[in-house]
Image (spheres, rainbow, N blue to C red):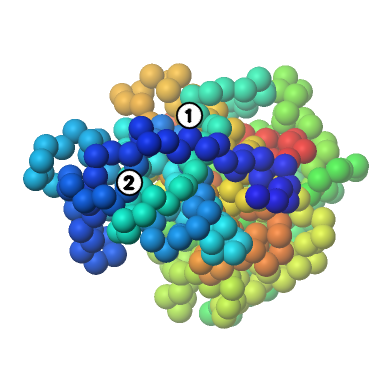
Amino acid sequence: MKLKNKNDALFEEKNIYSEDMYAKGIYPAVQGDTHGYVARDDSERMSAVFKAKHGNVYVLRFPEKLGALRVAAVKTDPRDLSEGETLSYEVSNRLRFCEGAVDQSPMLYTPNCCDEYLVVYTGEKLKIPFYIGEAPVILGHDTDDEWFYAGPQQDIMGNADSWADFRWNAGEVYENIYEKKLRPLYPGKTESVFIGKEDSGKYDMRAYIFTPEKYEKTLFLTGGVHGEEIDGYMGLARFLELCFGSDGSNRSLARVRDGVRLIVVPIVNVWSSYNGHVRTNSKGVNLNRDFEKHTQAETINVLWLLEQYKNEVAALIDFHTSIALKNDLYYQFSIQAPNSAVCRRTCNHIYEALRARKMDFSPTRLEYVPGAYEKADGFLQGWVWNHYKIPTLVCEHHDIRWAPRHSAIGHELAAEFYGNFIIQTALSDF
Ligand SMILES: [Zn+2]
C-alpha cells in the first residue's frame, strides 16, 4: 500500500493470516443482505474468526478475489457451536471500504460492542489469503495531553439560576449568549456575520468569527444542523465562554483562545429553533443529507461561508447530540483524514473521563465510523472531507444517557467533551 499521509501508517497490514485462525468450517447461508446464519459445516469453504477488541479499528486487506470474501460480525464465538447449531449474524454497516481500486481496497471494521467476533468467509473452495491489521488504538489507552475539565455547571432549563434556556430560538441564542456573554469576554476581534436567510426566508442565519491578534490555525465549527439536538450547540457555546474567560490555569484553553481563529455557525437549522426545535427545516429536509446537492438555503449559506475560508480552515467540527440510546459515545470522522489519530485519541480520553466518574455503568458502545465517507456526501462531514479535503469530525454528546436532558451534569459533559475535541484538534499538528 502506498502511504499518502502519516495516518496511513495506521493501516499497514500485519500478516496474521494463519491456518490456525481458520475455524473448522463456518458456512454462511445468506438470507438477504443483512441476515443469515453461520453454521458449522464440513465444507471446505475457508473462514477465519477473529475476536475484535472493543475500540479498535480493524483493517482487512484482500489482495485478490475480493468479491468472494465476506465479513460478518457475531456476538458469540462461532467456533463454540456444536454440529448443526446455527448462529444469526448481521453484515455490519460498520464495514467500510476505503478508497482505491476494488481489488486493493482494505475493508475497515470497528466493533460496536465488547466481545464481537469478526467472521471472514468465502463461498469458494479456495484458500484466499487475506490480512488483518489493527489500527492500534485501544479504548482506555490514555495519553499525556492536558485534559480540560469543565467543572460543575448550571443547567439549561431556563430557570432563574440556569445558564441558558433550551427553548431559546436562534435570535435569543445569538443575543443572550454570543452577544452578551461571548463578545465581551473575547480578547480579539468578534465579528457577527449575516450569512443569509434560512430556507423559508423568514429568519437570519449568523456566523460568529473570533479572531485573535495572531493565529496559526482556523477551525470551522457548526451546531444545530439538527434542530432538536439542542445540547450540542449549547455545550459548544458554554465551552467557548469558558475558553474565552480562561484564567490561564488550563494552558490549552488560553492557547486556543489566543492562537486559533474560530468560525462558528451556532445554529444551522435556524427555522427549527423558532418552530418547536424539530429535526428538519421548514421544507421537512434533513439538512445533514443535503450538503452535496445543497438544495436548501441553510446548506448553501454554510458552504458559502466555508468557500471563503476553505484554504485556511484546518478542520471542521460539527456538534450534534446523540438523542438515540444506540451508542454511548458517538463520533464520526474519516479514518483516511489526517485528523483521524487525534479524533480517536480524544475518544479514548472521553471514555476514560466517563469511567473515572464512576457512573452507574461504564460506556460499552462506541461508534466511530472509519472510511472515506464514500457514500456520505449528503452529510456536512462527508461532503467537506470528500470535496474540499478539509478534515472533519462530528461529535455527539449523549443527552440522556449520562444525565437528564438539559441538566447541569449533561451541560458539563457536553462542554467538556466538545471542548476537548476543539482543543485537541486546534493544538494538534495532525
Ligand atoms: Zn444530529
Which residue is tagged 2? 47
Position of residue 297 relative to residue 64, above or below, is: below
User: Could you tell me if the residues under marks 2 and 1 are in contact, i.e. CB atoms within 8 Å?
Assistant: no
Residue 255: x and y in percent read 79, 32
Q: Is mark 2 within 8 Å of ligand 1?
A: no
> How many C-alpha atoms fall within 10 Å of the one at disc 1: few (<14), some, or many (≥20)?
some
Q: Secondary structure at mark 1?
A: loop
Looking at this view, is 198 or 389 the one in front? 389
Residue pictured at 57% horizontal, 41% vertical: 13
Which residue is tagged 1? 139
Residue pictured at 23% horizontal, 36% vertical: 79
Residue at mark 2 to residue at mark 1: CA–CA distance: 27 Å
Looking at this view, is 149 or 292 the one in front? 292
Residue 372: x and y in percent read 58, 58
- Splitting the image into 4 quarters, where does residue 25 fall? top left
- Quarter occupied by the C terminus: top right
> How many C-alpha atoms fall within 10 Å of the one at disc 2: few (<14), some, or many (≥20)?
many
Which is in the foreground here, disc 2 or disc 1? 2
Earlier in the chain: of badge 2 and badge 1, it is 2
Residue pictured at 26% horizontal, 50% vertical: 44
Position of residue 333 relative to residue 365, above or below, is: below
Badge 1 amino acid: Leu
